[in-house]
Amino acid sequence: MKNSTFNIQHSTFAAELHAELAALDERGLRRRRHILESPQGAHVVVDGREVVAFCSNDYLGLAADPRLAAAAREGAERYGVGAGASHLILGHATAHHALEAALARFVNLPRALLFSTGYMANLGIVTALAARGDAVFADKLNHASLNDAVLLSRADFKRYPHRDLAALEKLLAASKVRRRLVVTDAVFSMDGDIAPVPDLLRLCERYDAWLVLDDAHGFGVLGATGGGVLQHFGVASGRIVYMATLGKAAGVFGAFVAGENDLIEILVQRARPYIYTTAMPPLLANALLASLEIIAAESWRRERLTRLIHQLKQGMAGLRWRLMPSDTAIQPLRIGANDEALRVSAALAARGVLVPAIRPPTVPRGSARLRISLSAAHSEQDVAQLVGALRVVEKES
Ligand SMILES: *Cc1c(COP(=O)(O)O)cnc(C)c1O
């Protein structure tokens, strides 16, 4: 940590840490946790109060679905609680195996591999596929886990401005390395906009690169049956390394990577965050099998989400604070200054509406925002309450 501004001479370790925390407070960057006392959902109990929340990634409202809880209980009865070992030793249960097959079918790719978290999946993909002497080309607004993955791989790290295809093409054209990976969020987690996947794929074909897509926020939500960004654009290619998480729209926990058979087999052999960790509890895989069926069958959840997005955009027209351009469930309201974003978030909370203020380093300096995330669990009244509260808070500030 070299970026703190404290200047205590001859400080002890404890005094340095204390000063570093004080500096975070001073810059409005200290993060605090709330205590969630109810299941995840549109209406939650937080720190003893009932509020309407626009904070979760539970886009389809499945995190607290009783059918998923029942499948988890059934899984616990059949398998117990812990996997007890890594996948490659003896932790790979029937439910994991069935889930991998179901996930591959779901995204229409030859094979899928489960990871314990999306963070680990990204570390696994990039470190298994790129090393010193290779190059990774990355959108500047990519998720932190993708950035950490590139650093850990020791490949050359080339970042291009957000969704700037011309800048990416220049970098690719100038590259002479053995192996090239283009990595991008499919739906950007703090902006809600969608990567130009067909154009990225064309560039990857022209410059012989592979395309790693992190569809954490698209899986289950985009596409007619929730197949994600590939279904949304109707694209397919042997160059695609597809990754999605299972703790967001799918409502449970975990992540998977899907693609060609040899790609997946290389990950089994080489991805250290796959090899050197305990398999997810099989009861979660059982819950996820139930979740996949609901995601495909209940398209009303995606339709409702689309209606709520539309309602929010219409309701916010004419406000001083502007929604950023997004057609997904992530609808960020740009504020700018850290302290103002915190103040607006606190004023909404005082009115029983919870929206998180997102500040640097999660987003670029000067672009603090309220990250409104909508869910099929919300009702039109919930969105109307949010819009009404924002209008009042704007007038008061
Ligand atoms: C949430 C998220 C991850 C991490 O997934 P986890 O399963 O929560 O570890 C990775 N990439 C993106 C874009 C995310 O939003």
Image (cartoon, rainbow, N blue to C red):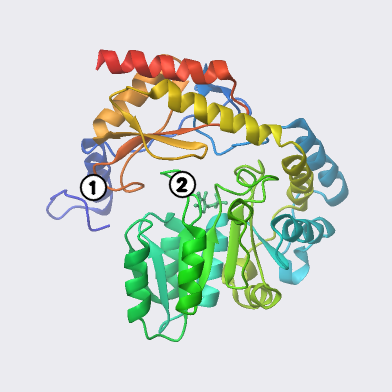
Q: Nearer the viewer, residue 183 or 245?
A: 183
Q: Residue at x 59, y 20 (%)?
A: 379
User: From the image, which quarter does the C terminus lie in?
Assistant: top left
Q: Quadrant of residue 91?
A: bottom right
Q: In this rendering, would 272 be left or right of 321?
A: right
Where residue 15 is drawn, which disc sits there? Answer: 1
Could you classify mark 2 by the number of other residues whose Cα lies within 10 Å: few (under 14), some (14-19), or many (20 or more)? Answer: many
Instruction: Check the image and report above or below for 37 versus 138.
Output: above
Q: Residue at x 45, y 49 (%)?
A: 188
Mark 2 residue CB less than 8 A from any atom of ligand 1: yes
Q: Quadrant of residue 153?
A: bottom left
- Determine which residue is flagged by label 2: 189
Query: How far across and down, in percent of the image, does residue 59 sit?
Result: 59, 37
Which residue sits furthest right?
Answer: 78
Element marked by disc 2? loop
Q: Nearer the viewer, residue 121 or 106?
A: 106
Q: Residue at x 67, y 51 (%)?
A: 227
